Image (cartoon, grey):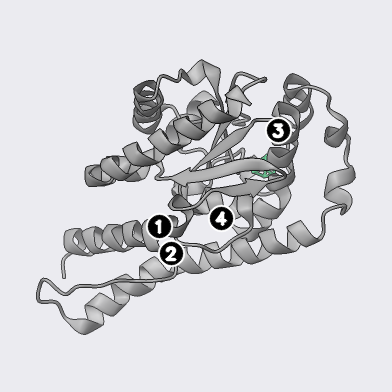
Amino acid sequence: MNNDVKKLLIEALVDQQEIFGDELFVKKTFDVNPNQFKTAVDASSTKYNANEQSLKVAERIETETGSSLFNEDFMNAGTIAELNSQICECQKCALGKTRTKFVFGVGNPNAHAMLIGEAPGADEDLQGEPFVGRAGKLLNEILKAVNLKREEVYIANILKCRPPGNRDPQSNEMETCTPYLHKQIDLIKPKIILCLGRVAANSLLNKKLSLTDLRNNIYEFNGIKVMATYHPAALLRNPHWKRGCWEDVQKFKKLYDELLEN
Ligand code: SF4
């Protein structure tokens, strides 16, 4: 198998993982040497196992709320701006050394809706703002399609610094960074959260579900409604998922409007 085919196969497996999580559905539609296929699957599994580890750590954090992480000064921040200034120099995990810019979050600090992704990518790392570049542009279009403006909502990530090469967040990084997101949510007090991608949703909800399950249900985090849809970067790779995303954001907007009325 040449490198291009292997790359395509790995991307397809990662995309499957984005939707189905634990379950892998493989339909053999081309001739391939089984040993070479196994190599590609193993390469994808490395990414999957990293997620598993992250989620186990997230579970432990949830049961350990009240640990020293939650007693630090940033927990006393009274505003989003204050929180940003207290944590923007953070070096608590290795990503602090490799980031270009700290990516705190952007939007209305009094927003009724928060959108949460996984971690900054290359464009975000350079500009210090979440969801810029092609994925950000697509997210703006998705919001516009349901009559929401980027400035109306608040957008943040689970991690505030870019994992090198856009790899998945590691357990120690999630463990250290997640309390910052929880504090952001606590200050903004949104009525609804839309998670962009399986990793962000599972991390916030402390679950291990497929994106299909996550998309088909409404969850709660500290009394706040939580929904999930595809990450815009996944939609750029697979435009045929846009229909599903469109249905998700319509449901999200309907619930958003209902929550605002009450
Ligand atoms: S990823 Fe989070 S915990 Fe790690 S250095 Fe950045 S802000 Fe700090």
Residue 23, placed above or below residue 123 = below
Q: Is residue 154 left or right of residue 88?
A: left
Question: From this viewpoint, is residue 118 visible?
Answer: no
Quarter-wise, where is residue 107 in the image?
top right
- Estimate the x, y position of residue 103 in percent, counting from the top left: 59, 31
Which residue corresponds to mark 4? 202
Which residue corresponds to mark 2? 21
Which residue corresponds to mark 3? 184
* Figure label count: 4
What distance separates the C-alpha of mark 2 from that of mark 4? Answer: 10 Å
Say what amino acid the circle numbered 3 marks: Gln
Residue at the (79%, 61%) spot, across then down: 63
Q: Nearer the viewer, residue 136 or 206?
A: 206
What distance separates the C-alpha of mark 3 from that of mark 2? Answer: 27 Å
Label 4 residue SS: helix
Label 3 residue SS: helix
Residue at the (43%, 38%) spot, across then down: 251
* Mark nearer the N terminus (3 vs 2): 2
Q: Nearer the viewer, residue 85 or 229?
A: 229
* Mark nearer the N terminus (1 vs 4): 4
Say what amino acid the circle numbered 2 marks: Gly
